Image (cartoon, helix red, strand yellow):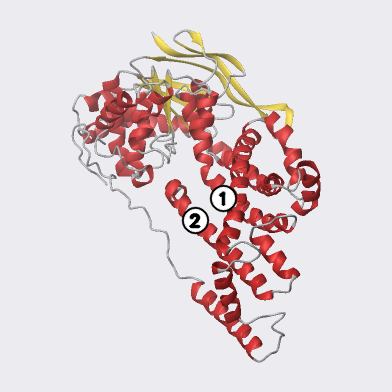
Amino acid sequence: MSILSLQSVSLAFPADRNISRTRLVLDGITLHLASDEFIVVIGRSGSGKTSLLNLAAGFLKPTSGRVSVDGTDITGPAADRAVVFQDDALYPWLNARDNVAFPLKLKGVAKGERRLSADDLLAKVGLENAGAKNIWELSGGMRQRVGIARALASQPRFLLLDEPLGALDALTRTRLQQFLLKVWSDSKTGALLITHSIEEAMLLATRVIVLAPNPGRIIADIPASFGRQLLGGKSLQDIRDSPEYRRLHDGLNGLIHADSEEEAA
Amino acid sequence: MTINIGTVIPVTPTMPGDVVTEAPKPRRSLGTLPVSLVTIAVIIAAWSLASAYGLVSPLFLPSPLIVLKAIYSVAVNGFVDSTLAEHTLASLLRIFAALAVALIIGIPAGLAIGTSRIGKGILDPIVEFLRPLPPLAYLPLIIIWIGIGEASKITVIALAMLPPVILSTAAGVKSAPADFINAARSFGATRLQILLQVILPSTIPSILTGTRIALGAGWSTLVAAELVAASRGLGFMIQSAAQFLVTDIVIAGIIVIAAIAFLFEILARLLERWFVPWAAHR
C-alpha cells in the first residue's frame, strides 16, 4: 500500500521572462512510496530531483498529473510529510529543544508535554544533552540530527529529505547515513531522499530511482538491499567489497553519466 | 581512506563531527578608536586655543571651560524655568512616545509590505511620499491640524521615524530564508503562525536596525519640533538661548544632544546583543 503517489506528474516552469514559453522540468513521473520503503532519487544537477521533492512536499503544484497521499490529492504542504532541508533550516532564535518542539507548538501541544517529547526525540538522535544549546553552537552533523528530530516530531507519514547530508564532511556523512537508516527503521515511516551521491543512494535505499535531465524523467527503478544488510549487522566494508555492490555501483554510474559525454561534445 | 566501521554504530552522543564549535568572538580590534580620540583632542585643543588667544569673540565661541560651566549651571540652576534634567526628560519623553507610535504602526505596516502584494500596493506610495519629505515641511500643517501641544510634536517625530521602521521591517521579511517558511509549512503551520512565529522573529534584527536609524531621524526632528512653541526640551533650550545670544548654553545643549544620541547608539547595540545574539551567526 503506497502512502505517496505521483501519477504521470509533469512540471513546467516559465522559461526566462517569456511567460508563454515554458521549460519542462519533470516529464511523466510515476512513483509510489510504500510505508516501509526508503526511496532514494539520484540524478545529475538539472534532473529536477529537488523539484520532485518539492512536488511531494506540496511546495510546488504539478503542471499535469496527480500527487496524492493515502489516496487523497494534496493541496499544499501538510504535517503528514515532514521535510529535512540541506541547510537544516533550524530557527536560530530557538534552542535545539524548542526547534524540535516547534511542530508540536504549531499543533497546540501544551508546553510541558512538548518539552518532554522534544527531549525524547533528542535522545533518540543521540543529542540528549544538547537541548538547551543554541543552534549556532552545534556542528553541521548535530544540526542535521536536530532537523531530523524536528521532522519526526510532527509524526509524519513519511520523511522528505532534500540532500540532508550534502554539506557534511565525508566521515560525518558516512556516520549520519547509518544513523538515518536506523532512524528510518525505528520510526517505521517511509522516506524519500534526494542525493547526487551514488554511494549514499546504494547504502540507504530500498529502491534507487535514477532521473535523467532535460526534461527530468525516471530512467531506472532498481531495488537495493544494502541498507537492510547494514542494519542486519553486515559490515560496511564487506558490503562495499561484495560483487553485487560493485555491479550496481557501475550500473548506476553508467546510467547517471550516460549522456554527459555527448553533452560535452 | 578505508575505515572499518563494522556494524551499524549505536547512536551515541559522541559521534565524530560533534565538536561543538565555540561561538566566534566578535573581533574586538581597537580599529579607529585611538585615531578618533586624537581627532577629538585636537578639536578641543584648537577650540581652547582659539578662545584663549581671542581669535574668535566669546560671543560666538566661548571657551570649552565656559561651556562646561554652562552645562553645570543649567544642570543646577536651570535655564528658562527648567533644569537641564527637566529639559532632557521632556525631550526623551517625546522621542520615546514617538518611537512607540512608530513601532506600533511601522512593524505591522512593514510586515504587510513584505508579505502581501496588496499590502505593498497600498502602503508603498504612502511610504515613498513620506520618506523624502523633510519633517519641517509638514510641521506647520500638523500644527494647523492638531495644535501646538505635545500631540503635534510627537506626531511629527513619529512621522519622521515611520519610514525607516517600515522599510527595515519589510527588508527583513524579504531576507527571511525561504526554507524557514517552507519548513513551517511542512509542519502544517497556518499563515498567521508563519507570520508570528517565523517571519516576525527572523525580522527582529532588521527591526532593531530600523529603530536605530529612526532614533537618528527622531532626534533631528525633535529639535526642529521644539523650536516651535515648546516651553521645555533641549531644542527649546537651545532656541531660547540663541535668542539672547547665550552662546555657551547653545553649545552646551548641542553637546548634551550629541551625548544622548551616542548613548542611544550604544544602547541599541547592547539590545541587539541581548535580543538577537543569533543575528551575528547567520
Q: Residue B278, how many percent across, how many down?
A: 43, 46
Q: Label 2 is found on which chain of the structure? A: B
Q: Amino acid at mark 2?
A: Leu
**CA neighbours of label 2 inside 10 A, class few (<14), some (14 to 19), many (20+):** few
**Mark 2 residue element:** helix
Q: Nearer the viewer, residue A205 or A265?
A: A205
Question: Does the image show residue A136?
Answer: yes
**Quarter where residue B102 is shown:** top right
Q: Position of residue B213 (x, y in %)?
A: 61, 53
Please give the name of the residue rendered at 72% of the width and 54% of the height, measured from the top-left corner.
B225
The residue at 36%/14% (across/down) is A35
Q: Position of residue B61 (x, y in %)?
A: 68, 80
Residue A222: which quarter of the image? top left
Which mark, residue A114? none
Residue lying at the far bottom of the rendered structure: B53
A113 left or right of B61 in image: left
Q: Nearer the viewer, residue A67 or A84?
A: A84
Are the two marked residues, 2 and 1, in contact with CB atoms closer than 8 angstroms? no
Can residue A192 be seen by looking at this rendering?
no
Tell me the quarter of the picture where residue B72 sits.
bottom right
Q: Where is residue A67 shown, x and y percent of the image?
A: 52, 14
Of residues B51 and B183, which is closer to you in this image? Answer: B51
Q: Secondary structure at mark 1?
A: helix
Crowdedness near tag 1: few (<14), some (14–19) or many (≥20) residues, C-alpha within 10 Å: some
Q: Residue at x 31, y 33 (%)?
A: A177
**How far apart in space, not on screen, are marks 2 and 1 (Cα)?**
12 Å
Does residue A121 sit above or below A63 in this rendering? below
| Residue on which disc 2 sits | B267
Q: Which of labels 2 and 1 is toward the front? A: 2
Chain letter of the residue carrying label 1: B
- Is A203 displayed left or right of B219 in the figure? left
Instruction: Write down the residue under mark 1.
Output: B209
